[in-house]
Amino acid sequence: MNIIGFYFIYSILWLFTLLPLPVLYVFSDIFYLLIYYIFGYRKKVVFDNLRHAFPDKNEKEITKIAKKFYLHFCDLIFETFKIIHFNKKHVNRRFRYKNIELFEKYFNEGKSVVLISGHYGNWEWTLAFPAQVKHKSLPVYKPLADERFNILINKIRGKFIGRGGLVSMNEAFKRVIEEERNHEKIVMYFLGDQTAPKSSKLWINFMNRETPFYSGPEKIARKFNHAVVFMNIDKIKRGYYEAEFIPLFDDPAKTEELEITRKHVATLEHFIRKRPELWLWSHRRWKHQKDNVQDKDNFSS
C-alpha cells in the first residue's frame, strides 16, 4: 500500500467510525450477508477447520456454527476500527475484567506475569487492560506483511498502552531481559494461537490436529519464573465482553518442558469447544504439516 492509499483508507475509516456502534452493527449485518452468501470469504477454510475440529457434528450443525462465526467476525471488524474514537469510558463500559485483583496479588508478591489468550472473543478490546494493573503492560504482536497497515493497526492497538508499549514477537525475549535488569514487574501478553512456522519442533494436538506452536511464552515463564495466567474473553451480548483470568502456574521454573504450553493450549481448546463461534476459524491455522525439524522460532534464549 502506498502512502496516498494508506491515508485515504485511514481517512475513510476515521469518518465512517464516527457512527455509533448500533449503526455500525447494521453495516456489520450487511457485510455478513455479502461475505458469507455472495463472496464466500474463506468459506472453504472455515468449513474445513470446523469439520476437522468437530467430526461428531453433522453438516447442519457445522453450518450453524459457521454462520454464528461469520456474524461475530463481522462485528469484530467493525468493533476493532471503532477503537479509533473510543475513550477509556467507552472501553470500560463495554469490556469488563471479572477478577482483575489477581494481578494486585502478583504485584504485591513481586511477580511478573506471562498472560496468554487466543484469537477468541474480542482480543482487540483489551486495550484498557494496562490502566487496570500496576505492572508494566507489554502486549506482543506479530507484524503484518503490509508495513503501513501494520502501523495503522498498531496505532489503534496502542491507544491506551500506558508506560509499556507494543512489542514485536522478534523482540520479546530481549525486552524481558531489559525489564528484568531494570527490576520492572511486567505483564507480557501473548496470543498463544499465532501460527508458528513449519520449522517449529513444538507440535501439540489442538482441535483434533497436530499443530505447531511458538515456545516463547513458556521459555520466558520458565527462565524468569513469571506466573502464567490464561485470559478467557467471553461475549456477554453484542458489543459487550467480559474477561476472566485463570491462573495456570505460579511457579513455572518448577514445571517440565512443554507442560506450560500444553496447559494453555488445552485451556484455550476448552473454551473454544464451549462457544466455537467466538474463535477465528478463518485463520489458516493448519496450513503446515508436521516434519521432523528443529525449532527455529523467534524466541530463542
Image (cartoon, helix red, strand yellow):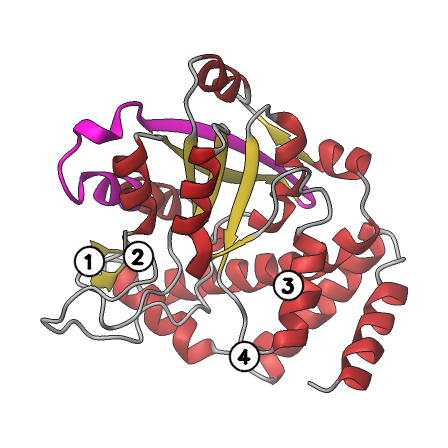
Q: Position of 59 compared to 257: left or right?
A: right
SS category of the residue bearing label 2: loop
Give the residue type at disc 2.
Tyr
Q: For the residue labelled by badge 1, is the local secondary structure a helix, a strand or a loop?
A: loop
- The relative height of residue 130 versus residue 125 in the rendered view (above or below) is above
Is 238 positioned to the left or the right of 19 in the image? left
Cα–Cα gap, marks 2 and 1: 7 Å
Magenta residues, as a range? Answer: 238-265
Q: Which residue is mark 4?
A: 41
Q: Are marks 1 and 4 in contact (CB under 8 Å)?
A: no
Q: Residue at x 47, y 60 (%)?
A: 280
- Of the residues shown, which amino acid type is indicated by label 1? Leu
Choose the circle earlier in sequence order: 1 or 4: 4
Q: Mark 3 or mark 1: which is in front?
A: 1
Disc nearest the viewer among 2 and 3: 2
Between disc 2 and disc 3, whose residue precedes?
3
Rounded to the nearest whole Å, what is the CA distance between mark 2 and mark 4?
A: 27 Å
Asked if residue 118 shows in the view, the reply is no
- What label does residue 44 carry, if any? none
Residue 201 appears at what percent x and percent y? 17, 62
Which residue in the protein does label 1 denote?
202
Q: Which quadrant of the structure image shows residue 62?
A: bottom left
Judge by depth and name the residue closer to the eye, 22 or 37: 22
Instruction: Give the residue at x 38% y 48%.
Output: 272
Q: Is residue 280 visible?
A: yes
